[in-house]
């Protein structure tokens, strides 16, 4: 392969990487602005420590193997 072809390929791959990172940043920024606090169950206290919230329940549900 020629040096010119390798240079064009590197520029193309770099553009894909930067474009993908930019797209991910936009998606994360949009999703972060609309986040609402997780609801706390009636049995949980507002003190420090572990609390079983809806967010935690959702994680446990999706993490099952």
Image (cartoon, rainbow, N blue to C red):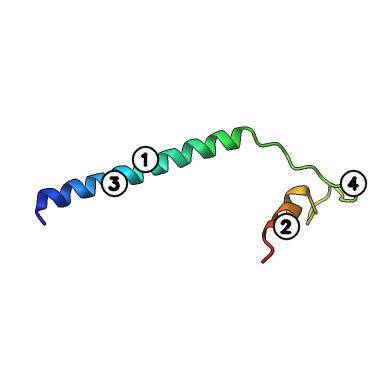
Mark 4 sits on what residue? 42
Q: What's the distance in space between the residues labelled 3 and 2, CA to CA?
A: 38 Å
Where residue 53 appears, x then y in whole percent? 78, 50
Mark 2 sits on what residue? 61
Whether residue 28 is situated above or below residue 56 in the rendered picture:
above
29 or 15: which is nearer to us? Answer: 15
Residue at the image point whose x is 16% and y is 48% from the top: 7
User: Tag 4: Cα neighbours inside 10 Å, few (<14), some, or many (≥20)?
Assistant: few
61 or 41: which is nearer to us? Answer: 61
Q: Do callouts 3 and 2 mark residues in contact (Cβ within 8 Å)?
A: no
First in sequence: mark 1 vs mark 2: 1
Q: Secondary structure at mark 1?
A: helix
41 or 16: which is nearer to us? Answer: 16
**Quarter holding residue 49:** bottom right
- Looking at the rendered image, the quarter that the N terminus falls into is bottom left
Q: Secondary structure at mark 2?
A: helix
First in sequence: mark 4 vs mark 2: 4
Q: Secondary structure at mark 3?
A: helix
On residue 14, the disc is 3
Residue placed furthest toward the left: 2
Mark 1 sits on what residue? 19
Residue at the image point whose x is 67% and y is 61% from the top: 63
Where residue 33 appears, x then y in whole percent? 60, 33
Lateral position of residue 13 relative to residue 23, left or right: left
Q: What's the distance in space between the residues labelled 1 and 4, CA to CA?
A: 45 Å
Of circles 3 and 4, the one toward us is 3
Q: What's the distance in space between the residues labelled 3 and 1, CA to CA?
A: 8 Å
Of circles 4 and 2, the one toward us is 2
First in sequence: mark 3 vs mark 1: 3
Q: Secondary structure at mark 4?
A: loop
């Amino acid at each position: 392969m020629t040096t010119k072809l390798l240079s064009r390929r590197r520029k193309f791959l770099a553009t894909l990487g930067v474009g993908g990172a930019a797209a991910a940043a936009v998606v994360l920024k949009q999703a972060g602005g609309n986040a609402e606090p997780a609801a706390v169950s009636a049995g949980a206290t507002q003190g420090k420590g572990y609390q079983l919230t809806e967010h935690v329940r959702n994680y446990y549900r999706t993490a099952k193997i």
